[in-house]
Image (cartoon, rainbow, N blue to C red):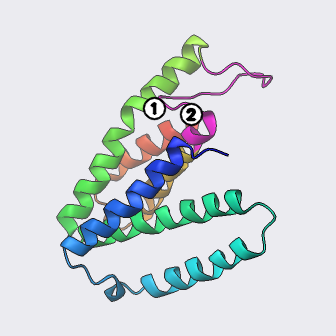
Amino acid sequence: GPVTPAAGVTVMSGLLCAIYLGLRRVNIFKFEETLPLIIFLGVSSISLFVTLNVEESLMDWVRIFSIFCVYLITRATCDTYRRIRAALAVILLSALFPIGVAYYQHLSGTGLSTNFEYGRLLGTFAHPNSFSSYLLILLIFCTPQMMSKKPLYPRVLIWVYAALVFII
């Protein structure tokens, strides 16, 4: 089958990650999680040689690799309290518009029409599964903050934000 735009973006993110880390001369092996993740990527690539559908398996492996790349860039750039706090703010603030659109879709009944009783919400995404994955990532960021003794932002704001995400 043809290469999808999503696959192209995934490959580009991997290349950009390699370029960024190379130009910044980041030693990725100083992060204790790097070696186990590389071993995992190596072991999971074995499935490429025993699968019935090489193209689909390769797409899945590239997807896992892109997650590893995002991890490396995040680990390399969010190295101080201030940068971690700024990254969390960017993630949470960038989600306000898609969440607002999802609430609008829910209240106006303009979400994706399906055979589900209430339909499915898209937010600003093209597919409801992508939107739900995005919301899950937001909850993953919020959960440790809700339980932290010293959250990066006032606990009430994090709880309200998580509730808005969870309700959608």
Magenta span covers which residues? 111-132
Q: Is residue 27 left or right of residue 32?
A: left
Q: Residue under circle 1? A: 99
**Residue placed most toward the observer, 128 or 16:** 16
**Residue placed most toward the observer, 47 or 112:** 47
Q: Residue at x 28, y 49 (%)?
A: 89
Check disc 2 and give the amino acid type: Ile
For marks 2 and 1, the one nearer the N-term is 1
Check disc 1 and give the amino acid type: Ile
Does 167 appear above or below 159?
A: above
Residue 167 occupies quadrant: top right
Residue 44 occupies quadrant: bottom right
Q: Residue at x 31, y 54 (%)?
A: 88
Q: Is residue 112 left or right of residue 135?
A: right
Does 47 appear above or below 53?
A: below
Q: Residue at x 69, y 57 (%)?
A: 56
